[in-house]
């Protein structure tokens, strides 16, 4: 999964003589966008930028949990409320968070002098375009729907009332005891009856219709054609054999992460989220453009959502015979604006030339490790040590720093009573990791923590041990660069195909630092044959782990390891410095702006502020924030930025 998420932070340098004058000018803007979809659904599409992303505050990812819709709705309401009334400033709370040096991020490759700038002052300052496996950059540039004689007419989507749709949905999902739904034909013509028949069958797959006379009036009767069997796979009904089973489309979204977007789409379409597929997840606080595939939903139905959804646009529709698979992408293309920059033209030129020619250290970014006082890598280390009491303690114990009030109360109750039921009562949000673990402890008992922990979704559990691998890798790469600099040396590792081999003395001149890889620890990797190979062993020994035995008695937690390039050189790098007066105006046009014909605002020649607009492409699993760090020479951690700015404006 490529990870490009970063909350708005003022990348402000420590108080140098050049920067003190600008200290009060840099502010973070809260952007709140509320939208109400059409009346045909109760789903509310709301995006509110907060400080910072709650999934980061809690050290967990938002997870789609099936069959917990009421719980999910309650959780969303709670997460959107701010009932805690904390008097402690966010900056004070973040004193307990992580800095880059805490996770091994300590080196730079360039020699230019750093400068200040604001990243993501507006979420529209950070735009991500997915690069498909064919090398094509995804763009939303076409709203047209493929012509298909089998598609229903446009009137199909408006002929049914909201009440009719509600009753039909309940019938389709067998939510009541009714065996049929009768819809009165108000303007009785054959054409009108045909449209209603089409609307029911296309919008509610699995239902059949017939016409009946009742008391001199015409009714369309909807019913299940084959009972529950029809519901098991409703999309198999009336899908043309000549049409590909998957509708591929480009999803343009603003200030919403990929999983949330798919949840919203699935609720509007009345389908399960698992019929959607994609190549990578994109972050929330950005404008992102990516390809999505959905099983047996027509382009016409998808295009209709453009009329009732805000912050989303769907287009570039096509039918294909295959879904999308995670990791199939070549990478992402970024367009980033750093506002209110302080660097001279020479500094900026040096920084960007270095990024283009040398690149940046391919560190795992701060979002890999969480933002609270208990980093995710510590939990991962305890899992690998098979220390399950420590795992439970790290997840549930009280911790200083930025957390929701209900989590604080839950932790306090746990520390006082060690009673999962009592702690769970303090926790109205049940789908967070803490709630899932407590439910597991309630179900399996305190003596079976392994099974209790297993209730947490697998991806979240593996996130902890991957975080530990990333922590080791970051530290070892910093040691490698400190010891040997930016050149390939004998004993380094390079890849030949998928196989890692050591660089021999006689071959060292054939390779550069851009060829060198370093291993994430595991049972199926080899290590460098120089001081850093020993450093890996020493670091794991200090953590009570055996580098030669990375298999775990629980198969899920056995680490095979992998290789990762230590320097990434971005492709398609370009930049320009622009002047502006109004911090709220956009500094470039998006795909949607172009489709809607919006011109770029006229910018002053000599504005009050300067911004650096940069573009670059990165491969999967690399962090754009680490590229930006190299340009600015700044610590990108939330802790560091909040301490420098003293106040995190909401």
Image: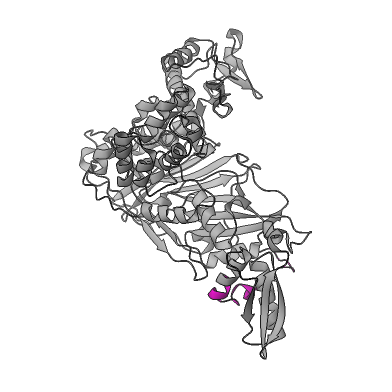
Q: Residue at x 21, y 34 (%)?
A: 17
Q: Residue furthest bottom?
A: 216
Q: Is 267 one of the magenta-colored residues?
A: no
Viewport quadrant of the N terminus = top right
Q: Is residue 570 above or below residue 189?
A: above
Given residues 427 and 130, the one toward you in this image is: 427
Stretch in magenta: 145-165
| Residue 43 visible, this orientation | yes
Given residues 395 and 365, the one toward you in this image is: 395
Q: Quadrant of residue 270?
A: bottom right
Given residues 312 and 579, the one toward you in this image is: 312
Give the x, y percent position of residue 318: 68, 57
Q: Is residue 623 above or below residue 319?
A: above
Q: Is 151 one of the magenta-colored residues?
A: yes
Give the x, y percent position of residue 602: 39, 59
Question: Could you tell me what secondary structure mostly forms the magenta stretch?
Answer: loop
| Residue 612 visible, this orientation | no
Give the x, y percent position of residue 498: 65, 24
Q: Residue at x 60, y 58 (%)?
A: 271
Determine whether, in the image, residue 29 is placed left or right of residue 499: left
Determine whether, in the image, residue 404 is placed left or right of residue 231: left
Q: Residue furthest right?
A: 242
Q: Is residue 354 above or below residue 409?
A: above
User: Which colour scheme appears in the figure?
Assistant: one colour
Q: Quadrant of residue 634?
A: top left
Picture mark count = 0
Give the x, y percent position of residue 620: 55, 37
Q: Residue at x 47, y 15 (%)?
A: 536
């Amino acid at each position: 999964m490529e990870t490009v998420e970063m909350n708005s932070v003022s990348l402000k340098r420590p108080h140098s003589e050049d920067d003190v004058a600008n200290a009060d000018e840099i502010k973070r803007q809260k952007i709140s966008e509320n939208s109400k979809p059409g009346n045909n659904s109760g789903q509310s599409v709301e995006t509110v930028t907060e400080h910072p992303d709650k999934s980061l505050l809690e050290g967990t990812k938002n997870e789609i949990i099936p069959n917990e819709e009421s719980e999910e709705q309650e959780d969303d309401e709670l997460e959107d409320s701010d009932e805690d009334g904390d008097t402690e400033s966010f900056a004070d709370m973040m004193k307990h968070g992580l800095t880059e040096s805490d996770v091994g991020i300590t080196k730079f490759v360039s020699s230019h002098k750093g400068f200040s700038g604001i990243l993501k002052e507006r979420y529209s300052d950070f735009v991500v375009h997915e690069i498909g496996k064919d090398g094509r950059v995804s763009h939303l540039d076409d709203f047209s729907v493929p012509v298909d004689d089998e598609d229903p007419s446009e009137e199909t989507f408006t002929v049914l009332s909201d009440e009719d749709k509600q009753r039909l949905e309940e019938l389709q999902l067998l939510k009541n005891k009714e065996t049929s739904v009768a819809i009165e034909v108000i303007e009785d013509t054959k054409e009108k009856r045909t449209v209603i028949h089409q609307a029911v069958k296309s919008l509610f797959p699995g239902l059949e219709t017939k016409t009946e006379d009742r008391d001199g009036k015409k009714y369309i009767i909807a019913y299940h054609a084959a009972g529950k069997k029809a519901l098991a796979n409703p999309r198999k009904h009336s899908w043309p054999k000549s049409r590909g089973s998957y509708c591929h489309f480009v999803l343009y979204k603003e200030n919403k992460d990929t999983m949330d977007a798919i949840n919203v789409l699935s609720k509007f379409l009345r389908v399960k989220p698992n019929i959607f597929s994609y190549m990578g997840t994109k972050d929330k606080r950005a404008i992102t453009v990516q390809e999505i595939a959905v099983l047996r939903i027509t382009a016409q139905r998808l295009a209709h959502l453009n009329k009732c959804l805000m912050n989303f646009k769907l287009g570039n529709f096509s039918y294909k015979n295959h879904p999308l698979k995670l990791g199939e992408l070549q990478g992402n293309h970024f367009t980033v604006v750093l506002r209110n920059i302080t660097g001279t033209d020479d500094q900026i030129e040096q920084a960007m030339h270095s990024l283009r020619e040398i690149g940046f250290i391919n560190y795992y970014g701060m979002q890999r490790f969480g933002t609270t006082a208990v980093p995710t890598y510590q939990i991962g280390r305890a899992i690998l040590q098979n220390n399950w009491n420590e795992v439970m303690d790290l997840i549930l114990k009280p911790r200083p720093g930025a957390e929701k009030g209900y989590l604080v109360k839950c932790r306090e109750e746990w520390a006082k009573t060690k009673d999962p039921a009592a702690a769970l009562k303090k926790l109205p949000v049940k789908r967070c990791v803490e709630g899932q673990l407590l439910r597991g402890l309630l179900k399996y008992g305190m003596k079976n923590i392994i099974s209790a922990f297993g209730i947490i979704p697998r991806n979240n559990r593996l996130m902890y041990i991957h975080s530990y691998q990333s922590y080791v890798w970051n530290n070892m790469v910093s040691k490698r660069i400190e010891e040997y600099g930016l050149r390939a040396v004998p004993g380094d590792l390079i890849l030949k195909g998928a196989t890692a081999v050591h660089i021999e003395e006689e071959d060292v001149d054939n390779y550069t630092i851009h060829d060198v890889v370093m291993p994430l620890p595991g049972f199926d990797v080899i290590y460098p044959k120089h001081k850093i190979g020993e450093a890996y062993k020493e670091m794991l020994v200090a953590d009570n782990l055996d580098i030669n035995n990375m298999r775990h008695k629980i198969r899920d937690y056995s680490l095979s390891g992998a290789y990762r390039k230590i320097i990434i050189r971005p492709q398609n790098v370009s930049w320009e410095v622009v002047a502006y007066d109004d911090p709220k105006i956009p500094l470039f046009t998006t795909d949607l702006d172009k489709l809607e014909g919006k011109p770029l605002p006229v910018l002053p020649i000599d504005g009050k502020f300067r911004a650096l607009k940069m573009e670059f492409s990165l491969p999967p699993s690399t962090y754009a924030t680490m590229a930006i760090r190299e340009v600015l020479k700044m610590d990108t951690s939330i802790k560091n930025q909040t301490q420098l700015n003293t106040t995190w404006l909401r």
